[in-house]
Image (tube, rainbow, N blue to C red):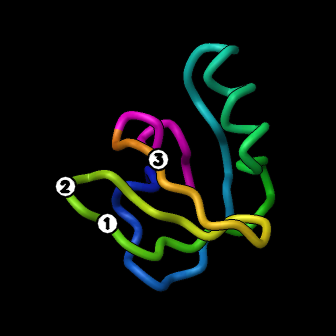
């Protein structure tokens, strides 16, 4: 399921990252790699703030839909 459907506060493991190569590379640079854990801190209008690799990152709905948990 995409990250946009995750419950707030629930820890999830990233299974796959979709999209074009440049988008996947950008998400990898932010810390979204397959096998790492990600926790949704807040979700407003589909946009999410997540905790990944000791950082809080805000990503758009479009980006979050490419992250499969």
Quadrant placement of the C terminus: bottom right
User: In which quadrant of the rendered view does residue 43 lie?
Assistant: bottom left
Q: Farthest residue in the left direction?
A: 45
Residues at marks 1 and 3, CA–CA distance in whole angstroms: 10 Å
What's the residue at 68%, 27% (across, down)? 24
Q: Earlier in the sequence, mark 1 or mark 3?
A: 1
Please report the bounds of the magenta region as a residue range: 62-69
SS of the residue under disc 3:
strand
Q: How many marks?
A: 3
Q: For mark 1, what is the residue?
A: 43
What's the residue at 78%, 37% (across, down)? 29
* Labelled disc at residue 45: 2
Q: Farthest residue in the bottom direction?
A: 9
Please say whether residue 17 is one of the residues in the magenta stretch.
no
Local crowd size for mark 1, using a 10 Å CA cut-off: few (<14), some (14–19), many (≥20): some
Residues at marks 1 and 2, CA–CA distance in whole angstroms: 7 Å
Q: For mark 3, what is the residue?
A: 59
Return the residue nearer the eye: 54 or 61: 54
Residue 3 in the figure: left or right of residue 55: left
């Amino acid at each position: 399921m995409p990250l946009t459907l995750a419950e707030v506060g629930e820890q999830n493991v990233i299974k796959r990252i979709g999209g074009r190569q440049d988008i996947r590379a950008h998400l990898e640079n932010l810390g979204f790699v397959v096998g790492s854990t990600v926790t949704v801190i807040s979700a407003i209008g589909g946009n999410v703030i997540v905790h990944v690799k000791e950082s809080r990152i805000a990503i758009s709905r479009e980006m979050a839909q490419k992250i499969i948990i």
